[in-house]
Image: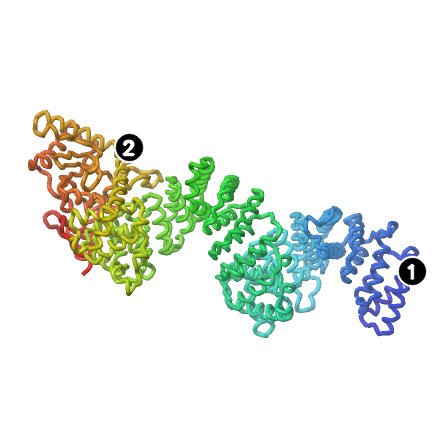
């Protein structure tokens, strides 16, 4: 009988002699031949269970007759009139025995699952449920049926029924048994594997553990690997399984994780395995529960193993080491010593596996393991050249069937983050990706594209495949971060996929406001703005697409305004402002909000951390957007002045100066600081772009800094030492330098010969703006005598292109006449503290046109009166908005016969917040006067609404008396040598209240009413036309 055989085998299962084994083999063979009769006659489920369990646990379990017996039992139990198993413990034993023998008859497991469902909850015990669930989940895992696509309805019904039975049992369990923890660990681990995430079930588990831990201890546990807590006994395996199950089910219960952290720190070092440590750390990392005690304890355990030589490949699998590294990196722990120790273990593993596999380790090292290792090292900023080399070799041997799209994307992204931009490796990963089945998320596509973009590796075939896959995915597959990453990668790599960008624009409009964060918005707008030219073309070709883009930007601007200041980084602020600037879009509320964010930047506690590069980016972005905020630029100025000299680079100085010049901000303390820093740099530190920016900025702001300009000009004139050649400059940079030389009246022959020959070499690539600047430079030579022509033999060759140069200049001047005289001021916004656009220093086009019109109309009345009185010649006519014939400058109001003109100068002609004219305005005045024009400048503050008509007429009559009729009057020369009625307030700064000039410039003095600044200061000294001082000494 089976029962007798089972009892006998169970009694001696671990001490079988050869004679015993022969005897049992004979008995099992006989039982196998007559199993149907034995089961029909007297076999019960308990007897079968006992026989199977005894055989599975005996030393003869590996014999062929044992497997044959199990197979025969499976067949008999699956026949139509089979014996139904109604006993929970017997059923659990049968399933567990088959699992122990690694025999997985699918129909038997599912039929026994139906039997388990038919048992009432009270018929189960905690141990039997644990064994049933553990065996059944192992069966599904063995048959690769753990995905939702493979499981059958009977499997779902089985787990639902067992979950309900488990819940009822846990609720009734007032006094948990001593071994309840191990049973609970098996139960929750099985449920988590198949995706059962009933929160009430997991909460019931917590309540049982609470009751057990608070109950009186019944007996001291034996063995160093166990920890007693109340009535329950814990071991590292059970704790690891429970934590892992809660992490998989995304149930973050504070009491459980805190209690287990305390239990874990009481366990001895030798009670853990590497798999336990990996599982425990990964559970805490996945749930986001911070436990410094667990991290430190596990780190001490690993160091203990290393100290006693136990940190070896035999103790660690690659998967365990990868999970440990990944857990520490996700917690932000950069333990270099720990990472280095585990890296050595991994290297030994890889070398051993690859040598055993004849150079290929694809069978032993999974792509998931490699993915975990690479991302852990990237997150922890741990770079091991040897480890990366071995990982690269492993990845290069992957075949399409060895990996998945998710793992490929993580490996590619992690490798690039670690600085490994090997084109062969990335190309191999790209090819593997293109043959993988599609996934439900767009994140892998974004990660692959991002990796190739960061590596600056162009692969149009791969990007087309990514685009095709992204176009097929539904909207839920995208998040704001995914879109940001994908769009940024395509834009950075120069992939102009307009269809994809239109779809991403649509997807962004579908994402709820709360799903956007500051960084994702910054990356999205930056990516779309990089395609500015393409979108601008769509404005005419596809107006609907361009309108959608602007709608998206307006929506994102609204979201940005609602985000808290703490969410932003310095880089994010710069990216957002710069993107809106590229598209020419302005939103005063958003700019004001971002300005307030930027004003929180600094180096002290509770401030947004920033570097010189961050400050440069923000200043430059606001300048490009033509947005001026006095408080913001004042704060940036103070930050820059407080930074040490070694933090600056020549290129940063050039960008900063250019940004302040764009907004007409003449910040003298900052200019002095930047000048001093630049003077301490070697001339070779300045590249072509920096040199052009410095020249142009000083010229725009009308700042004469002879020492700085001479210092950077040294780079231009010592090409043999610095390897700086004209070819290093683009056409715009050269024209900027030429224009700046003209504005600042730099008469050094060597420098002028260099600029003439350099411009000649690039003249074919110069656009209208560059040619216009070149025209003004030529005027400075011809009409102002900047440099004698005999000292510039290169000028003749340059003048051979005069027709093209003058055509470009004429077009520029005609455009000025048709744009309501607001050159350099279009779209400039000055922000108040409430975020609205202020107008104290801004005249809009209509207002500026109205000012000029009012001056012209009043002058016509005065001129008519003078003609009626026969004071002026009747043939002299007053003209408005004309082109002067010699210089081709546009004139607001002129009397050509008398060589007289009035320029109505708005705020754009002066440094912000002052009455100091800008360089281009002064140069125009000089060059017109040089050809004999009597020029008068009417600044906007002199023609204000407080003047009556008679006062306005009197003012104009006095001007005509002096400049046209030659009658002396009260007007004095007070503006840098120009005969104009402009009172320059040189002491006013845009930074706060006015300060004395000697405080600002380090000790100035007055000579004949004109301000002269002490040596080395940055305010321009009074100069008369024709006084050419060489920059170079």
Mark 1 element type: loop
Please say whether residue 126 is visible from this viewpoint: no
679 shown above or below 919: below
> Mark 2 or mark 1, which is nearer to you?
2
**Outermost residue toward the top?**
868
Lateral position of residue 1002 relative to residue 871, left or right: right
Q: Is residue 946 left or right of residue 180?
A: left
Q: CA distance from mark 2 to mark 1?
A: 108 Å
> What residue is at 13 percent from the left and 26 percent from the top?
864
Residue 846 tag number:
2
For the N terminus, give its image quadrant.
Answer: bottom right
Measured as percent of width and height from the top left, residue 414 is found at 52, 58
Which quadrant would residue 687 be assigned to in this image?
A: bottom left
Q: What label does residue 156 carry, if any?
A: none
Q: Are marks 2 and 1 in contact (CB under 8 Å)?
A: no
Q: Quadrant of the C terminus?
A: bottom left
* Figure label count: 2
Which residue is rendered at x = 23% and y = 52% of the image? 797
How far across and down, in percent of the image, does residue 672 sit? 24, 55
385 in relation to 618, above or below:
below
- Sequence-wise, the earlier of marks 2 and 1 is 1
SS at circle 2: helix
List the single residue furthest toward the left.
967
Dot 2: few (<14), some (14–19), or many (≥20) neighbours within 10 Å?
A: few
- Locate residue 346, reporting x and y percent: 58, 67
Question: Where 327 sits versus 889, above or below?
Answer: below
Q: Is residue 680 left or right of residue 369?
A: left
Residue 262: give x, y in percent of width and height. 59, 61
The front one of 785 and 936 is 785
Note whether residue 924 is visible.
Answer: yes
Any mark on residue 34, and which?
1
Front-most of 610 and 130?
Answer: 610
């Amino acid at each position: 009988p089976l029962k007798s055989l089972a009892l006998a085998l169970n009694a001696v299962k671990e001490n079988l002699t050869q004679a015993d084994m022969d005897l049992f083999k004979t008995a099992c063979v006989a039982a196998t031949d007559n199993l149907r009769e034995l089961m029909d006659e007297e076999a019960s489920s308990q007897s079968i269970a006992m026989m199977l369990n005894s055989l599975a646990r005996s030393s003869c379990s590996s014999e062929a007759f044992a497997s044959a017996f199990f197979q025969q039992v499976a067949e008999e139990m699956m026949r139509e009139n089979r014996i139904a198993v109604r006993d929970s413990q017997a059923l659990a034993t049968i399933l567990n025995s088959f699992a122990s023998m690694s025999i997985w008859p699918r129909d038997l497991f599912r039929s026994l699952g139906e039997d388990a469902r038919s048992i009432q909850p009270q018929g189960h015990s905690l141990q039997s449920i644990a064994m049933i669930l553990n065996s059944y989940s192992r069966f599904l895992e063995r048959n690769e049926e753990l995905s939702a696509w493979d499981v059958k309805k009977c499997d779902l019904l089985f787990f639902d029924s067992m979950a309900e039975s488990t819940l009822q049992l846990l609720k009734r369990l007032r006094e948990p048994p001593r071994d309840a923890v191990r049973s609970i660990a098996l139960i929750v681990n099985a449920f988590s594997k198949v995706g059962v995430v009933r929160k009430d079930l997991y909460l019931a588990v917590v309540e049982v553990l609470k009751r057990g831990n608070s109950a009186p201890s019944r007996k001291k546990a034996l063995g160093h690997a166990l920890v007693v807590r109340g009535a329950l006994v814990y071991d590292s395996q059970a704790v690891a399984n429970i934590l892992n199950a809660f992490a998989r089910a995304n149930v973050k219960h504070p009491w459980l994780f805190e209690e287990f952290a305390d239990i874990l720190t009481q366990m001895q070092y030798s009670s853990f395995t590497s798999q336990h440590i990996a599982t425990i750390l990964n559970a805490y990392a996945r749930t986001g529960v911070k436990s410094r005690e667990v991290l430190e304890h596990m780190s001490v355990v690993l160091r203990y193993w290393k100290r006693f030589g136990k940190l070896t490949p035999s103790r660690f699998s690659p998967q365990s080491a990868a999970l440990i590294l990944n857990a520490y990196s996700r917690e932000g722990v950069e333990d270099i010593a720990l990472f280095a120790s585990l890296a050595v273990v991994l290297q030994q593993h890889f070398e051993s596996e690859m040598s055993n596999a004849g150079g290929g380790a694809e069978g032993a090292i999974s792509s998931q393991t490699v993915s975990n290792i690479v991302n852990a090292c990237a997150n922890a900023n741990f770079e091991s050249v040897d480890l990366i080399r071995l990982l690269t070799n492993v990845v290069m041997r992957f075949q399409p069937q060895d990996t998945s799209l998710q793992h490929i994307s993580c490996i590619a992204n992690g490798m690039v983050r670690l600085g490994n931009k090997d084109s062969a490796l990335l190309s191999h990963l790209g090819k593997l990706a293109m043959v993988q089945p599609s996934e439900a998320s767009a994140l892998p596509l974004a990660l692959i594209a991002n990796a190739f973009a960061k590596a600056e590796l162009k692969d149009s075939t791969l990007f087309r495949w990514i685009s095709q896959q992204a176009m097929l995915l539904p909207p839920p597959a995208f998040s704001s971060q995914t879109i940001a990453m994908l769009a940024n990668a395509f834009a950075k790599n120069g992939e102009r996929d307009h269809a994809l960008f239109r779809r991403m624009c649509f997807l962004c409009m579908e994402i709820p406001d709360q799903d956007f964060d500051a960084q994702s918005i910054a990356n999205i707008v930056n990516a779309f703005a990089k395609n500015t030219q393409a979108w601008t073309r769509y404005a005419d070709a596809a107006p609907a697409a361009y309108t959608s883009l602007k709608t998206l930007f307006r929506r994102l601007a609204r979201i940005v305004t609602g985000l808290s200041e703490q969410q932003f980084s310095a880089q994010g602020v710069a990216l957002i402002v710069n993107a809106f600037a590229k598209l020419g879009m302005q939103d005063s509320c958003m700019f004001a909000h971002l300005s307030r964010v930027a004003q929180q930047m600094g180096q002290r506690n509770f401030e947004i951390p920033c570097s010189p590069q961050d400050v440069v980016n923000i200043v430059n972005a606001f300048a490009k957007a033509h947005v001026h905020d006095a408080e913001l630029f004042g704060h940036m100025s103070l930050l820059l002045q407080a930074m040490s000299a070694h933090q600056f680079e020549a290129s940063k100085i050039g960008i900063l100066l250019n940004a302040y010049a764009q907004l007409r901000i003449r910040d003298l303390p900052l200019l002095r600081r930047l000048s001093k820093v630049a003077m301490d740099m070697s001339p070779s530190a300045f590249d072509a772009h920096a040199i052009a920016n410095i020249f142009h900025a000083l010229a725009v702001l009308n700042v004469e800094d002879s020492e700085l300009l001479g210092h950077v000009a040294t780079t231009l004139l010592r090409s043999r030492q610095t390897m700086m050649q004209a070819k290093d400059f683009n056409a715009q940079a050269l024209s900027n330098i030429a224009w700046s030389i003209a504005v600042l009246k730099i008469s050094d022959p060597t420098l002028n010969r260099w600029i003439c020959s350099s411009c000649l070499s690039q003249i074919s690539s110069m656009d209208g703006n560059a040619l216009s600047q070149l025209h003004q430079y030529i005027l400075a030579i011809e009409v102002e005598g900047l440099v004698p022509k005999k000292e510039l033999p290169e000028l003749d060759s340059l003048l051979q292109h005069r027709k093209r140069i003058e055509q470009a200049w004429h077009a520029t001047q005609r455009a000025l006449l048709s744009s309501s005289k607001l050159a350099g001021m279009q779209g400039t916004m000055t922000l108040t503290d409430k975020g609205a656009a202020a107008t104290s220093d801004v005249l809009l086009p209509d207002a500026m046109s109205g000012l000029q019109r009012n001056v012209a109309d009043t002058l016509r009345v005065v001129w008519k009166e003078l003609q009626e009185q026969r004071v002026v010649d009747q043939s002299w006519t007053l003209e408005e908005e004309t082109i002067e014939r010699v210089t081709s400058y546009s004139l607001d109001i002129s009397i050509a016969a008398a060589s007289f003109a009035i320029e109505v100068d708005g705020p754009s002609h002066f440094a912000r917040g002052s009455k100091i004219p800008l360089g281009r305005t002064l140069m125009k005045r000089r060059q017109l006067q040089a050809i004999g024009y009597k020029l008068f400048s009417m600044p906007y503050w002199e023609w204000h609404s407080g003047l009556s008509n008679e006062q306005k007429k009197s003012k104009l009559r006095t001007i005509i008396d002096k400049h046209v009729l030659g009658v002396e009057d009260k007007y004095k020369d007070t503006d840098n040598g120009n005969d104009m009625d402009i009172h320059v307030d040189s002491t006013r700064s845009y930074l706060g209240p006015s300060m004395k000039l000697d405080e600002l410039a380090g000790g100035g003095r007055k000579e004949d009413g004109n301000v002269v600044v002490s040596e080395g200061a940055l305010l321009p000294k009074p100069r008369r036309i024709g006084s050419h001082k060489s920059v170079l000494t």
